[in-house]
Image (cartoon, rainbow, N blue to C red):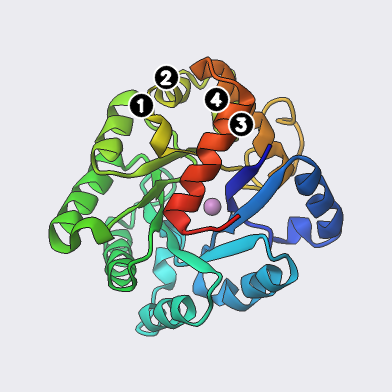
Amino acid sequence: MQLIDTHVHLNFEQFQPDLEEVRSRWQEAGVVRLVHSCVEPSEYLGIQALANRFPEISFAVGLHPLDAHKWTSQTAKQIESGASSSDSVVAIGEMGLDFYKADNYEQQHMVLEKQLEIAARLNLPVIIHCREAALELKRVLEKNIELYGERVRGVMHCWGGTPEETQWFLDLGFYVSFSGTVTFKNAHAIKSSATMVRGDRLLIETDCPFLAPVPKRGQRRNEPSYVRFVAEQLASLRGETLESIAATTTKNACDLFGLKL
Ligand code: NI
């Protein structure tokens, strides 16, 4: 069985002490590829070093909406030159809107639009972070699809939306990625959303070190091997086998990010 964890942050300090052991566990769990996300372009060299050390890692470059205040006149250039200078870069992001933890709406919008433009120009998929902002995000993506057509494509990562919101993004051609939150007991809307995503749009991730899935929820640190629990939850919710979820989500990750097994 082969799994792909489509969203990790292994450069965070939580993984410094024992990353080799963490890697052994993801290999044992069948995780064959990982897509490393990026919250700000200054992480680029550190993430690239991880990708050199562990060839199963590909990565993104971008600026997270909660770091939107860090955008400077240099940031677009940093993202674009970073993305163009390594074959391991497979996406722009993470980018998006987060109105749960911040209210700098205009700055977040500007930073999102700039990155969507870069991704369209480089013809790379985007990794979207969306919290309490689904309607706004839908509008922004619709506008960019009008401008750039099929070059605007990507994934709604760590998805937490309602079935109605999920349908909006499926209609725009986006993939939907479920994390440990789909295993949480009271996550009724997320579980419903997980049953309605078409097989060819479904992805899985851990978003580690955050959001460890049940049955590891009490642990302080999430890790890529736990993506298996997300896959198991999707299998149970959708009435499929674990092997079928693994095969489907692995193929989808390869299609979206251009990964080769
Ligand atoms: Ni993330």
Which amino acid type is marked by label 1? Thr
Instruction: Name the quarter where the C terminus is drawn.
Output: bottom right
Question: Of the residues under marks 1 and 2, which one precedes in the sequence?
Answer: 1
Q: Position of residue 204 (x, y in %)?
A: 54, 39
At 47% from the left and 18% from the top, the residue drawn is 188
Residue 192: numbered disc:
2
Do the CB atoms of the residues marked 3 and 4 lie less than 8 Å apart? yes
What residue occupies the far top of the structure in this picture?
239
Residue matched to label 3 = 230
At 56% from the left and 30% from the top, the residue drawn is 245
Residue 60 in the image: above or below residue 239? below
Question: Of the residues under marks 4 and 1, which one precedes in the sequence?
Answer: 1
Do the CB atoms of the residues marked 1 and 2 lie less than 8 Å apart? yes
Q: Position of residue 56 (x, y in %)?
A: 67, 60
Which amino acid type is marked by label 4? Leu
Residue matched to label 4 = 234
- Measure the alpha-carbon separation of dots 4 and 1: 16 Å
- Measure the alpha-carbon separation of dots 1 and 2: 8 Å
Which amino acid type is marked by label 3? Val
